[in-house]
Amino acid sequence: MPDAHRDVMSQWPAIEELALTRSRGLPIHDYLRNSKAGYDPKRDVLKLQLQAESLDKATTESIRNCVSKACYQVLGFQPNLEVTTSTAPSPAQRVRVEVASREPISGTAAADAPFLTSSRLPAGLDFGHFVIGPSNQMAAAAAVAVADNPGKAYNPLFIHGGVGLGKTHLLNAIARKLLPAMPRIRLMSCEEFVNRFVASLKNGRIEEMRRELRDSDALLIDDIHFLAGKEQTQEEFFHTFNHLYQLGKQIVLTSDSLPRDIPNLEDRLISRFHWGLAVKVEPPCTETRMAIVRKKSEARGIAVPDDVVHFLAENIVTNVRELEGAVVQLAALSSMSGKPISLPLAHEALRHLVKSRPAPARIATDDIIDLVCEHYSVRRNDLLSQRRTKNLAFPRHVAMFLAKELTQLTLTEIGNFFGGRDHSTVLHAINKIKGLRLKDAELRSELERFELQLRRPVG
């Protein structure tokens, strides 16, 4: 265990920076920025101390998820994570508290904090730093059009796509461009909206919250799919949406899927989300990934040789955030080891993240089924059968979800593959996993590992 201790703590700067990169624009960013880490080798526990009096369950879970992913990306495994809080605020936090008493500050996690009249936007999340390619060209063009002509071009603008593809970047870029002419911009995650709504109800300040929110010049909300299943919050958001829309105020929303594919979302919200323009951000092509690596490297003042650029672009294929994290990790290892950035160093730094061969162009449904069967210890014939026992239904739903996410098959084609089931059965299975994924951090990590294994060849 001493070796593990040395590995964890020596790599903590890379883990921390990657976690901060992942959390940019989210309420947890400030907590992570002021955190302290330690490692207990006997229990294999990474201790993370945050400067806060207390944290609610949702915020703690978001922090755990973010840091665990960063650990896995850097170390190749996830140590047990213990999150604690300290009541002694740092000097930076004391400044934020004093300023907050005069003017609201973006990203504060206090449940009773008022909504914002201005935004502190992370550096680098603007249109100039957004790398445009065939996979995101339409989304980027729509975002620029909204920023140039708010409330008139596309309202609402609904940007959807997978994790780490640039949705939050575009949301922040729109806010940055609007801000000089529109001081009352509300930019927040849907999780923050839900938490503040619940806190306002509890504290009897719901009318104050409504007034502040509906006085917005523009409303930008990240991960709107977090509304799934929250009936009372959906009711509140419905009326807020109507109020702003009727006044011609710009609304921009991001999600991991189209409105109609968000489980347990009211039909009237689905309808309104489709009033404007819905655009999808796809995983970037190889050329775009290369441009992203170069852009992120230049922004950090790092010289990355062409063969390393090719290596990263060919092996990290689904997530722009992972590409940026790879550049951070490579720079950290180069700095700590005193070695120049080279292809051998890239192999060493990213051995847990990438393989030395490019990912396959297509993912076979057979491979998905084999992986799911192996993981859940069920037989292939049973998974594809008509049996509906609990030990078969859940793995079958997971396999159908992965087939929809990772292949080009239609719902009907997936149903035919899974024992002749109709498309409505397949859609039900997919929506069920989507709903569980929102609430279950362990399932989210499991699905990400499945996707990682399927997208990369076995070495």
Image: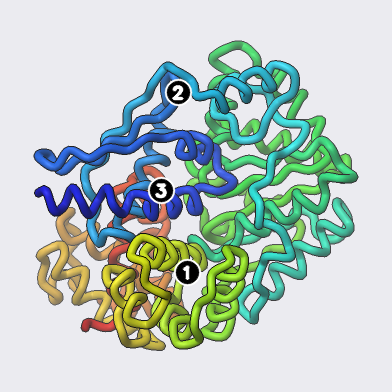
Q: Given this view, does label 3 or label 1 mark the residue nearer the observer?
A: 3
The reply to whether discs 3 and 1 touch (Cβ–Cβ < 8 Å) is: no
Q: Left or right? Give the position of 42 relative to 206.
A: left
| Residue in view at x 11 percent, y 66 percent | 378
Q: Are marks 2 and 1 in contact (CB under 8 Å)?
A: no
- Which circle marks residue 323 in the picture? 1
The residue where tag 3 is placed is 16
Q: Which of label 3 and label 2 is nearer to you? A: 3
| Image quarter in which the C terminus is found | bottom left
- Along the line of sight, the residue nearer the viewer: 455 or 325: 325
Give the answer, above or below, for where 112 lies relative to 385.
above
What colour scheme has been applied to the protein in the rendered image? rainbow
Taking depth in this image into account, of 22 and 137 the one nearest to the observer is: 22
SS at circle 1: helix
Q: Nearer the viewer, residue 104 or 278?
A: 104
Q: Secondary structure at mark 2?
A: loop
Res 111 → quadrant? top right
Disc 1 crowd rating (10 Å Cα; few below 14, some 14-19, many 20+) is many
The amino acid at mark 1 is: Leu
Helix, strand or loop for disc 3: helix
Under mark 2, the amino acid is Ala
Residue beneath the point at 86% across and 60% down: 153
Residue corresponding to mark 2: 52
Locate residue 31, reporting x and y percent: 48, 34
